[in-house]
Structure formats: structure tokens, C-alpha cells
Amino acid sequence: MAKRRENDLTQTALAEKLRMPQSFVSKVERGERLLDVIEFARYMAALGCDPVQAFSELVRDSKVLDRPNPPKTSKRQGSPRR
């Protein structure tokens, strides 16, 4: 949202650049919608940012890599196959 505002873009204007509905931008900004890698690259490019640099900063500044791995769950329950 900060980058969008720095560029004086409304959600509607950014959505038009992305060829997506305004509700998409709103959900992304509220954290209700996560972006896949391709969407992230397009989103950053629409904001005039280098996607690679933005991703690098995101990883560096976040705690995502500090989280422990989730516990492993059994893929199959029940009796073994024969």
C-alpha cells in the first residue's frame, strides 16, 4: 500500500494496470489474498518496482525464513499396502 501511495495510485488505477478488479488490490492490501510469484512480479512491475529487488527486500526484512518447519504429518493412515 505504501508503494502504491508513493506513486499516487488509487486501488482502481493499480487494478487497471494489472487488468484485475479493484477488489483484488483491496484484498492483497488487507492480507486476504496472497500472491503467487508471477502475480508478485506483475504487481511490483505495475508499481514501477524491480520485482527481484522487491522480493529480495521482502525476504531480508521478514521473519519468514526464521520460522521452524511445520510438523510432518503422515500421508497415509490405516493398514499398510501389500
Image (tube, rainbow, N blue to C red):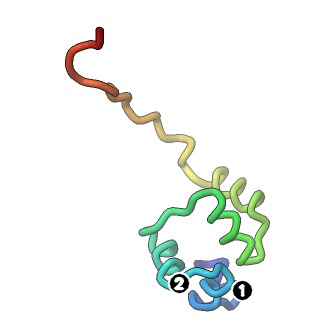
What residue is at 41 percent from the left and 35 percent from the top?
70
What residue is at 51 percent from the left and 72 percent from the top?
28
Q: Position of residue 14 (x, y in %)?
A: 64, 84
Q: How many angstroms separate mark 2 from mark 1 (CA)?
A: 19 Å
The amino acid type, in three-letter code, at marker 1 is: Asn
What residue is at 79 percent from the left and 66 percent from the top?
50
Image quarter where the C terminus lies is top left
Q: Is residue 74 above or below residue 45?
A: above
Q: Is residue 54 above or below residue 16?
A: above
Find disc 2 in the rendering and name its residue: 21
Residue 54 sits in quarter: bottom right
Determine crowd level at label 2: few under 14, some 14-19, many 20+ residues with C-alpha closer than 10 A: few
Q: Secondary structure at mark 1?
A: loop
Q: Is residue 54 above or below residue 78?
A: below
Tally the marks. 2
Rendered image: mark on residue 7: 1
Q: Position of residue 36 (x, y in %)?
A: 58, 58
The amino acid type, in three-letter code, at marker 2 is: Pro
Q: Position of residue 80 (x, y in %)?
A: 26, 13
Residue 45 sits in quarter: bottom right
Q: Is residue 59 above or below residue 71?
A: below
User: In screen coordinates, is 11 left or right of 48?
Assistant: left
Closer to the camera in the image, 8 or 26 = 26
Q: Position of residue 30 (x, y in %)?
A: 45, 74
Identity of the residue furthest to the left in this view: 78
